[in-house]
Image (spheres, rainbow, N blue to C red):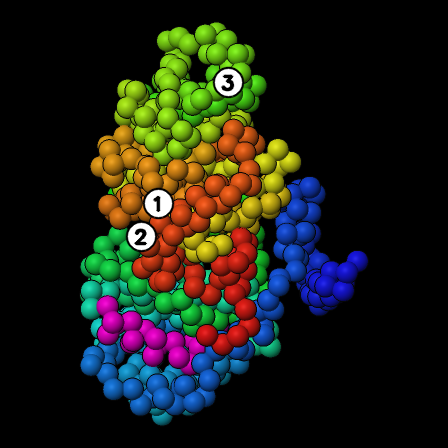
């Protein structure tokens, strides 16, 4: 074992041993029962993978310094909005209550009010503490004689709020001291904003350890339908909250999820601040620590998504996943439109046969045609195979030019009849029979232009689970090499979400969208043509959806061979320059579906580094 491996091993097991306690053992048994032995071991193994960057150190290096906070206090604002922090409290432990209040009082931005809905007015200790803090006129309290639940109590607290912005804070959580400053800054920079949210982390009960940072993307519709990733810190304009009707008691347990869905449906603009500004306290009664203990909350979340789909006039059913709090939406396929599957091919008749057999034998959706685009094959058995398979469902067309992936696919599309076009490599093999139904169900949605699948290497590690702009310099796949059983950072390898790009090794696109952007860019003969295509589709306002429930094996680039000649290397450099010149703005700004605090040199959502940015 190398010195680095030894160090990593020690860090990993030091963390494990630190977490061994009677409570965590009891919690582990609950998770074992929920997942079963095999999946529990997979989850445990993934959970304790050692990070290259220690988050506690990273957090210390990135939190606002005292001199920065002092400077923020003297900021000259063009617009200085009053922000009402709304907190329902009920028999809150004294230390938690004090720490929550003081985290608001310690804000570097002063135009706030703290509106507390006290549903336990008979609690003398709490009453004494609240009276003590009322020396600060910005702290307001409304007594709620009867505890009617978190939604009703929060609505009651909002009634005493006078700010034009409402921020939601749980009674045992904390705001970073620059949280409201960053909110006010966003309000000034984005006049149309009606929803603002930030990144968050978790903190131990004693506040000694920060962990599990949630570094979020900008607004991501399909991710929000998979999980309430926005969560904390959520701030919305008072006008918007009034328009959507505040909290609804029938969604208690997932009341914030329901409110966030309704607010984001109507918001003029949604702004994400990529900074850790909210600390979610984890203790034994917290859903942050023991999700299996509050099944009613996850059922309420499921109903919130179902009602959201109804409001959006989108037909679909919502299912729990084994990772509670994460959901799968199954959309309906309308009618039976023709799907044209475009497969470029040069020789490799065995791989092509395997691909075609898996489509024929496993695909439950039957209304498809296959266009094989022959490109300079040399082996006699290839042409013999073409004669054998050509027929009603399979058409062979010949591209006589040099290899140019973009041109070959554009040529294939010209011979296709379908309203939906599936670009597919010849070196893939279908795994699940509903793969095409699954992809089509997304692609039929009016807001979606492209749908990508989850691809595995033959050894059951991930080959593709979406593409992030900037990784590796231009763009790269995430979770490459991750074991198939692992779900990735916050389950992002295993849930539906929107991305900037997906691979054309298996990509479904509306024909109308393909034609609207002019197909694939033929200047990009081999590399990045799928990325460029996705970005141009995104520019037109369509979503690019990654759907992990469409699964295939990918034997990758059997036809083309390696990038190992001077000509190929020169061509690759030209394609890199094309991408950099055409998408320089995006490369500088960063992928909106990623987070600027995450690494562009690794594929696993690792933190960047410990240096202060």
> Would you say residue 173 sits in the magenta stretch?
yes
- The numbered dot on residue 582 is 2
Q: What residue range appears in magenta?
A: 170-190
| Residue at 34% over, 24% down | 412
Q: Is residue 23 above or below residue 110?
A: above
- The numbered dot on residue 532 is 1
Q: Are marks 1 and 3 in contact (CB under 8 Å)?
A: no
501 vs 362, left or right, is: left
Residue toward you, 241 or 377: 377
Is residue 331 in sight in this rendering?
Answer: no
Q: Is residue 194 above or below residue 35?
A: below
| Residue at 37% over, 22% down | 400
Which quarter of the figure has residue 602? bottom right
Is residue 198 in sight in this rendering?
Answer: yes
- The numbered dot on residue 378 is 3
In three-dimensional space, the C-alpha distance between marks 1 and 3, rounded to whole angstroms, equals: 31 Å
Helix, strand or loop status at disc 1: helix
Q: Position of residue 136 (x, y in %)?
A: 34, 90
Helix, strand or loop status at disc 2: helix
> Which comes sooner in the sequence, label 3 or label 2?
3
In three-dimensional space, the C-alpha distance between marks 3 and 2, rounded to whole angstroms, equals: 36 Å
Q: Position of residue 332 (x, y in %)?
A: 34, 30
Of all residues, the one furthest to the front in this rendering is: 566
Residue toward you, 264 or 378: 378
In three-dimensional space, the C-alpha distance between marks 1 and 2, rounded to whole angstroms, equals: 9 Å
| Residue at 24% over, 33% down | 515
> Which comes sooner in the sequence, label 1 or label 2?
1
Q: Are marks 1 and 2 in contact (CB under 8 Å)?
A: yes
């Amino acid at each position: 074992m190398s010195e680095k491996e030894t160090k990593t091993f020690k860090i990993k097991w030091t963390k494990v041993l630190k977490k061994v306690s009677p409570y965590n053992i009891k919690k582990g048994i609950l998770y074992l029962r929920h997942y079963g032995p095999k999946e529990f071991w997979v989850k445990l193994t993934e959970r304790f993978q050692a990070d290259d960057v220690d988050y506690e150190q990273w957090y210390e290096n990135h939190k606002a310094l005292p001199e920065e906070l002092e400077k923020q206090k003297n900021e000259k604002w063009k617009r200085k909005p009053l922000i009402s922090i709304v907190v329902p409290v009920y028999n809150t432990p004294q230390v938690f209550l004090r720490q929550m209040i003081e985290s608001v009082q310690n804000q570097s931005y002063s135009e706030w009010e703290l509106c507390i809905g006290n549903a336990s007015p008979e609690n003398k200790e709490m009453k004494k503490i609240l009276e003590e803090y009322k020396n600060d006129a910005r702290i307001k309290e409304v007594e709620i004689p009867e505890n009617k639940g978190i939604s009703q109590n929060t609505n009651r607290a909002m009634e005493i709020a006078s700010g034009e912005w409402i921020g939601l804070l749980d009674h045992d959580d904390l705001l970073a001291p620059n949280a409201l400053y960053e909110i006010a800054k966003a309000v000034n920079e984005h006049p149309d904003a009606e929803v603002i949210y930030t990144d968050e982390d978790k903190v131990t009960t004693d506040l000694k350890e920060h962990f599990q940072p949630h570094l979020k993307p900008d607004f991501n519709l399909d991710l929000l339908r998979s999980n309430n990733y926005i969560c904390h810190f959520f701030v919305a304009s008072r006008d918007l909250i009034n328009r959507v009707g505040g909290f609804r008691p029938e969604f208690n347990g997932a009341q914030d999820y329901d409110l966030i869905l309704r607010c984001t449906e109507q918001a003029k603009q949604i702004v994400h601040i990529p900074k850790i500004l909210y600390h979610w306290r984890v203790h034994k009664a917290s859903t942050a620590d023991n999700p299996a203990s509050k099944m009613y909350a996850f059922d309420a979340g499921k109903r919130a998504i179902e009602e959201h789909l109804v409001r959006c006039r989108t037909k679909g059913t919502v299912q729990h996943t084994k990772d509670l709090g994460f959901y799968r939406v199954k959309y309906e396929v309308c009618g039976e439109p023709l799907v044209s599957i475009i497969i470029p091919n040069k020789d490799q008749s065995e791989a092509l046969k395997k691909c075609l057999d898996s489509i024929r034998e496993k695909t439950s959706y039957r209304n498809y045609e296959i266009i094989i685009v022959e490109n300079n094959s040399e082996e006699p058995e290839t042409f013999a195979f073409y004669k054998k398979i050509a027929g009603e469902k399979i058409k062979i067309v010949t591209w006589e030019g040099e290899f140019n992936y973009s041109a070959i696919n554009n040529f294939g599309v010209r011979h296709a009849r379908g309203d939906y076009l599936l670009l597919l490599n010849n070196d893939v093999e279908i795994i699940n029979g509903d793969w095409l139904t699954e992809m089509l169900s997304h692609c039929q949605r009016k807001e979606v232009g492209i749908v990508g699948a989850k691809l595995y290497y033959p050894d059951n590690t991930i080959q593709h689970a979406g593409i992030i702009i900037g990784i590796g310099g231009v763009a790269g796949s995430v979770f490459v090499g991750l074991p198939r059983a692992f779900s990735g950072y916050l389950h992002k390898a295993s849930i539906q979400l929107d991305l900037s790009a997906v691979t054309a090794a298996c990509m479904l696109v509306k024909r109308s969208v393909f034609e609207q952007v002019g197909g694939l860019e033929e200047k990009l003969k081999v590399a990045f043509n799928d990325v460029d295509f996705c970005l141009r589709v995104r520019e037109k306002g369509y979503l690019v959806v990654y759907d992990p429930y469409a699964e295939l094996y990918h034997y990758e680039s059997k036809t083309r061979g390696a990038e190992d000649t001077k000509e190929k290397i020169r061509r690759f450099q030209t394609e890199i320059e094309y991408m950099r010149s055409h998408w320089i703005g995006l490369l500088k700004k960063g992928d909106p579906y990623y987070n600027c605090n995450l690494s562009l040199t690794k594929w696993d959502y690792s933190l960047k580094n410990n240096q202060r940015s």
